Image: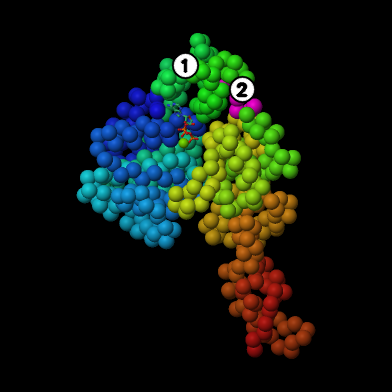
Amino acid sequence: MFFGRDADTAALTSRVRAQPVVVVAGPSGVGKSSLVQAGLVPALQAERRWSVALARPGGDPWLRLAAALLRVQRSQQSEVSLGEARREVGRLRREGFSPVARFLRSQDRPLLVVVDQFEELLAGGHPDQDLLDLLLPAPGAADDGARLVLTLRADFLPALQSIPGFHTRLNERLYLLSPLTTEETRLAVTRPAAAREVSFEPGLADQILRDAAGGSLPLLEFTLTMLWKAQRRRMLTFAGYHAMGGVHGALERVAEESAARLAPDAAGILDRVLLKLVRTPGPGPGLVTRQRIAQADVPVGEWDVLQRLADVRLVILDTDAAEGRPYAELAHDSLITAWRRLRDLVTDNGEFLSWLARARQRAAEGDPLPEARISEARRWLAARPHDIPEKVSSFIDSSELRPRPECASYETLSLVPTRHESRPVRRHATLRRCAWPPTRNWRCAPRARQ
Ligand SMILES: Nc1ncnc2c1ncn2[C@@H]1O[C@H](COP(=O)(O)OP(=O)(O)OP(=O)(O)O)[C@@H](O)[C@H]1O
Ligand SMILES: [Mg+2]
């Protein structure tokens, strides 16, 4: 049930029919993902059978895209194994979308690729250039019949534009989504209830619209969900609305009440869990996005807290379609600013979060930390051992142990004899343990070769 976006749905549908790539951009929470998934896709499907591959980049964007493409190529809903998805990544890197698009067109069900939350590709600070080239090709690239729709938080537009050559790739492709007008919001608020034969107490819908003016849609949706639960005899009431603190108080109240209900030992875990649910490319609450936590990566106590947060819809629990792993994530990015506890946590831990984001990025790229960064990493590991994922701490360890290219040329230096040796020798450090500066190499594991 999707109301209030008829005009945008029609406009976006005709843009997508006419051009291969469209980027739906707008402020966080304005309704981009909903417009594409609940407006555009059903509108396109109503006229012909499209094959819709929907992927969200997350931490493994190639894999997720590949898994989504494999699923649409199979007629039945079948599981995609990790091995299959990896092979598909190889093909996708070599040949792009064209072969799949041609295959699906030959079956008269053209390909629509939707990459939701495209900004997740940019949030780590070092976007994957090959993937950007695939998803946002240079203008004028051959039209193979596939359609690509990307949703992008508008505050990430400057980051995308600053990638050399990319400003021209956005021209002509942007669909800028504005907040719902008051009348559209009225439809979004009242129609879903009316369709289920539930009414608003007289005056309540107007009160909610006044309170929600200029506010975010996710907060409104959160409020309406709570109000729905508090309905009396198929009526949404002022009493229920005031009890939850209205549009502005609902989130804060529900969140803090659920925090207060946690067992005393779990309460201490809450802040740690909340910090794991966000990531930021730089200090401060600027470009913070939510991030998924895999159940396998957190202790049982933390997963319990995530389940409590899911009970009150602050967190979503789901299973990753590409990897089949259960995960948790914040219900919406806007919680990062709307929930005071989380906003303060992000601000107070800005330095740590931005260091962690950089370390994660390097770990994902297999780019070991330089020596100068290892002592900083060790400091964070000692100070916040429970806040650093296992993958990052083992990456720090392996950064220390890795051979460095500087060492390879080092053995060619001629050396002065030590006091134990009568003539100069060439030395070979054990490269596995060597690190810059070279003096450390010699302390590591020198062995002489005459
Ligand atoms: N037309 C609508 N009617 C009712 N609720 C809506 C509508 N559009 C969006 N919403 C709700 O508003 C919230 C935000 O929508 P959505 O996630 O689509 O926004 P977004 O722009 O994609 O946000 P983000 O920038 O974080 O990706 C969701 O909870 C969604 O269900
Ligand atoms: Mg979205």
Res 281 quadrant in image: top right
For the N terminus, give its image quadrant: top left
Q: Is residue 409 above or below residue 267?
A: below
**Numbered badge on residue 199:** 1
Residue at mark 1 to residue at mark 2: CA–CA distance: 18 Å
Judge left or right: residue 4 versus residue 432. left
Mark 1 residue element: strand
Judge left or right: residue 318 versus residue 191. right
- Residue 386 in magenta? no
Q: Answer yes or no: do the residues labelled 1 and 2 have beta carbons within 8 Å?
A: no
**Which amino acid lies under the numbered mark 2 shown in the image of this protein?**
Met
* Residue behind mark 2: 244
**Numbered badge on residue 265:** none
Judge left or right: residue 196 versus residue 267. left
Q: Residues within 10 Å of mark 1 (few under 14, many from 20)?
A: many
Q: Is residue 97 above or below residue 334?
A: below
| Residue 3 visible from this viewpoint | yes
Q: In the image, what residue occupies the spot 62% across and 73% down?
A: 432
In this rendered view, identify the residue nearer to me: 277 or 143: 277
Mark 2 residue element: loop
Q: What is the residue that sits farthest to the top in this orientation?
A: 202
Q: In the image, what residue occupies the spot 57% across and 47% down?
A: 293
Q: In the image, what residue occupies the spot 50% across and 10% down?
A: 202
Q: Residues within 10 Å of mark 2 (few under 14, many from 20)?
A: some
Q: Is mark 2 within 8 Å of ligand 1?
A: no
In this rendered view, identify the residue nearer to me: 220 or 181: 220
For marks 1 and 2, the one nearer the N-term is: 1
In this rendered view, identify the residue nearer to me: 312 or 155: 312
Residue 114: % across, % down: 38, 42
User: Which residues lie in the magenta part?
Assistant: 245-253
Residue 179: % across, % down: 45, 25
Q: In the image, what residue occupies the spot 50% across and 32% down?
A: 28
